[in-house]
Amino acid sequence: MTKELLHTDSLDDITVPAPIIPVPREYDETDPVYRSLEPLYRVEAKLALLMRAVMFSAMILLGLVMAAQVFMRYVIVSPFLGIEEMAPMMALWIYFIGMAYCSRERDHIEGGVMSLVIHKRRALLALRLLGSVICLAAILIYAKYAVDFAAFNISLNRQSSYMRLPKYLWDLSMVFGLVLMGFYMTLQVFLEARALLTGKGGD
């Protein structure tokens, strides 16, 4: 009934093959494209748990820190400037680890215009693979700059102005986020290439 109301009958075939996700969902585990990768996914599950713990902890701490700053500034009129340093640091960790987790789930924004124009499975898989390779190349370039920047700050032993925290605590959020994103994008490239070459998976 929903299809009749929304007039989506003509759109049934535009998402086939579906985009390949780096880490299979429960109902995708039997897809041929994921075969023989179970040991990798067992290790990756622990990594995903760690990422969720880091994001959750940083979000809770950020909320507490912001509440403490509001209380100190407007209730006891004694703001602590160190909070102005801690809040961006936690926000960076949330952002970059969240970016990697988004790559894991393939939840980033995609236009999907190609599936409106191209209906051949191999052509669509090939174009998606090309897009993934370009994204991976961009991630690796950004990761190199992030590592260089972190190494530069470590070599200078730079510290924050108020709390005297080492600046690499900010920089490592970029490094870890981009490296993890690169890992998931590499996995996505491998899976898309496998589906394209074997003719199996991603349906």
Image (cartoon, rainbow, N blue to C red):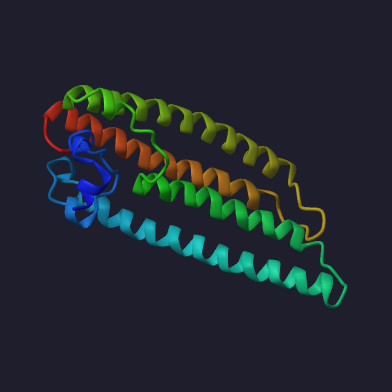
Q: Residue at x 58, y 48 (%)?
A: 172
- Vertically, is 178 above or below 71? above
Q: Give the side of residue 62 with respect to residue 16, left or right.
A: right
Q: Give the side of residue 8 with respect to residue 89, left or right.
A: left
Q: Residue at x 74, y 42 (%)?
A: 156
Residue 123 position, x and y percent, is: 21, 22
Residue 74 position, x and y percent, is: 83, 72
Q: Which quadrant holds the C terminus?
A: top left
**Residue lying farthest to the bottom in this orientation:** 76
**Which quadrant holds residue 148?**
top right
**Total tally of numbered discs in the picture:** 0
Residue 33 position, x and y percent, is: 17, 40
**Residue lying farthest to the right in this orientation:** 77
Q: Nearer the viewer, residue 38 or 5?
A: 5
Residue 101 position, x and y percent, is: 42, 51
Q: Residue at x 48, y 51 (%)?
A: 98
**Which quadrant holds residue 60?**
bottom right
**Which quadrant holds residue 31?**
top left
- Vertically, is 200 above or below 74? above
Q: Nearer the viewer, residue 64 or 161?
A: 64
Q: Give the side of residue 61 with respect to residue 21, left or right.
A: right
- Vertically, is 82 above or below 97? below
